[in-house]
Amino acid sequence: MFRRTLVFTLVLCMAFVFGGCAKKEEAPKQEASTATSADGPKVGGTIVFGRGGDSVGLDPAYETDGNSFMVCDNLYEQLVAYKDETTDVEPGLAKSWDISDDGKTYTFQLREGVNFHDGTPFNANAVVFSIGRMMKDRNLKFFGDGFEVPPQERPPEYWVSMEMDDTVGSIEATGEYTVVFNLKRVEAPFIANVGMDFASIISPTAFIKDPKAYLRNPVGTGPFKFVKWVADDSITLEKFADYWDKSSGGPYLDKVVFRAIPENSVRFLELKTGNIDICQFPNPADIDLVKKDENLKLVSQPGMNVGYLGFNHTKKLWQNLALRQAVAHAINRQAIVDNIYQGMGQLAKNGIPPTMWGYNDDVPGYAYDVELAKKKLAEAGYPEGKGLPEIKLWSMPVPRPYNPEGLKVGIAMIGDLAKIGITANVTSYDWGTYLKRQREQPEDMDLFQLGWTGDNGDPDNFLAVLFDGLASPAIRTQYKSERYHELMLLGKTTIDQAKRAQIYKEAQQVMFDDVAVLTVAHSTVIWPMGKNIMNFKLHPTGSVRMKNVWKN
């Protein structure tokens, strides 16, 4: 997962205490800020968003990458939504919800009068279909005729990695606008989870027409609808005229175009010349140029993210703790942060960012120590690297919030490894192939770069989804520890936040002791854009929300 950022507020996903039933009432809608424009929001126009790579697909149940999700953010909606600039939840397609006394039954009351982009109605059956299609053993009940859910073409990676089949027992439409989720166990992050991209509500009619082709023909209820996708070039969306939420006045734009421009420097030049309006992931050196350009401005926030170097734990070679320790102490991560992130990141020592509740500041981190690394290499059975095969380090081909330049980071890493006698080379693939092959844990992958932008502000979304290899084969790191797995299960089923925080602090210590991964950095997210772009707000989850944005 790579998402798929800030000072954020805990999403306390289970808003109840045992012995009482809590009800979430509809929150008032926040009006879009017009302080940036004396004349208020303007209707019309096109914004071109320059990003580092193309989307992999546009079916959010089956994708995991930020480049896919940022487009989905504007096409789809979920039962609950995250408020602007925070991970606090508010009503989305559900206007309210109730949680049973035992914390295992969630009843959602849905909005009426909402339509999908294809003109079909949003209702409880659409929710049962959209979420239920991800279940391995489908225990679903529709209201009235309902739908026949096609078989899965591939595993829904988020659903599987979050152990949702062990959580959700059944989904039932008890009325046209009422949906009941019956859980197998208490799941503390459940409400926050159903606000994530993978839980987007899709048009069943559109999906059933051609399930295999749906990922390139998406249909949701969001403020924009899909128009065209030119592979490795651009995706075009246009305003959905029948959009249900008129409270803020948006969507204002006629069109949004997501352009794929892999080179950071080229992407920034396109911004300077006016060919794009927003530039994702500039080179750190370009920030000063933005500040000097009267036509440009910056939007920034601390990142709710982590970039890491993973080990292929499925290979016997990397099941050697001393060898992992050698790598951890050999790589000068601070130099990477200083020279490649250039002020846009901080050294990471844990798998969650330091602004998140449950962070364990007592974990010391791995010191850069060449002599200690050499000692650990010898302990591993490879003194001065003798007998060790050439190491293949996979570097990311696209910039991400947690890693601005994967190739440069990879080159720096193999240079450091050479100092202790480890011979390594850097390899990469196009983004879609990289993600697909990495998931398969191939023999030609020893070390790999990946990272994560949090989805919901809960430590479970980092520590369990990224690192608990015993939970699912879909966990990309495939780190397997019985104690760590026990802690992750305990964290999910514990309601008290203070107790959960202690559980996650212990888990971070276990990760450190085992060298589960080598965390590298938490980045600061800074995006330059034209000064005529109004009301664009960065979000902790990395979402790109264009609904209330306008162009002067």
Image (cartoon, rainbow, N blue to C red):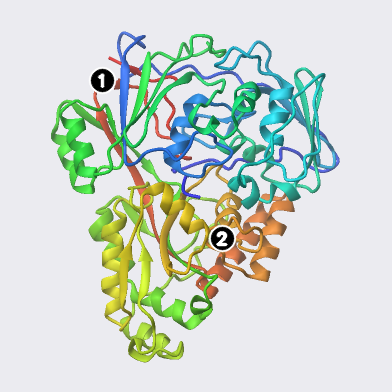
**Relative height, residue 297 to residue 522 (above, below):** above
The residue lying toward the viewer, choosing from 102 and 436, is: 436
Can residue 307 be seen in the rendering of this structure?
no
Compared to residue 109, the image places residue 495 above or below, namely below
Left or right: 59 with respect to 303? Answer: right
Q: Looking at the image, which residue is at 75% across and 50% down?
A: 166
Which type of secondary structure does the marked residue at label 2 adopt? helix
Crowdedness of circle 1 by 10 Å Cα count: few (<14), some, many (20+)?
some
Determine which quarter of the picture holds residue 172: top right
User: For residue 467, which numbered disc appears in the image?
Assistant: 2
Whether residue 20 is situated above or below residue 532 in the rendered picture: below
Give the residue type at disc 1.
Answer: Asn
Name the spot of residue 81 as percent of width and height, x first: 58, 29
Residue in front for this viewpoint, 161 or 16: 161
Q: Which mark is residue 42?
A: none
Q: Quadrant of the C terminus?
A: top left
Of pointers 2 and 1, the one earlier in the residue sequence: 2
Q: Position of residue 134 (x, y in %)?
A: 67, 40
- Camera-side residue: 488 or 275? 275
Q: Position of residue 439 (x, y in %)?
A: 51, 57
Quarter where residue 88 is shown: top right
SS of the residue under disc 1 = loop
Q: Which mark is drawn over residue 532?
A: 1
**Kind of residue at disc 2:** Phe
For image coordinates 30% across by 84% down, the residue present is 421
Residue at 48 percent across and 52 percent down: it is 436
